[in-house]
Image (cartoon, rainbow, N blue to C red):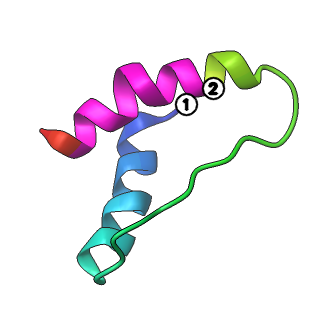
Amino acid sequence: MNVGSGAGAVRAYLDAGFDEVYIGQIGPCQDAFFAACRDKLLPALRG
């Protein structure tokens, strides 16, 4: 997962006024994807 581009994409929706953004994974390795979201993407959005 490219955290910088993922955070930028989510941030664009938040900046546009959305108060909920849903992130999904299509394909294999869903556990790893959501672990990366928890460990890398969410902290990048909070920080």
Q: Residue furthest right?
A: 27
In the drawing, does residue 18 fall left or right of residue 31? left
Q: State the residue at coordinates (42%, 66%).
A: 20
Query: Which image quadrant: the N terminus?
Result: top right
Q: Main secondary structure of the magenta part?
A: helix
| Residue for badge 2 | 33
Residue 45 position, x and y percent, is 25, 45
Residue 23 position, x and y percent, is 58, 50
Count of numbered labels shown in the rendering: 2
How far apart marks 1 and 2 lie (CA) works out to 8 Å
Q: What is the crowding at mark 2: few (fewer than 14 residues within 10 Å), some, or many (at least 20)?
A: some
| Mark drawn on residue 1 | 1
Span highlighted in magenta in the image? 34-45
Query: Which image quadrant: the C terminus?
Result: top left
Corner quadrant of residue 15? bottom left
Q: State the residue at coordinates (35%, 56%).
A: 8
Q: Which amino acid does label 2 sit on?
A: Phe
Question: Relative to 27, does residue 45 appear above or below in the rendering?
Answer: below
Q: State the residue at coordinates (36%, 42%).
A: 4
Q: Does the magenta stretch include residue 47?
A: no
Marks 1 & 2, CB-CB < 8 Å contact: yes
Q: What is the crowding at mark 1: few (fewer than 14 residues within 10 Å), some, or many (at least 20)?
A: few
Q: Which amino acid does label 1 sit on?
A: Met
Question: Judging from the image, what secondary structure is the residue with disc 2 in?
Answer: helix
Numbered disc in front, either 1 or 2: 2
In the drawing, does residue 38 fall left or right of residue 26? left
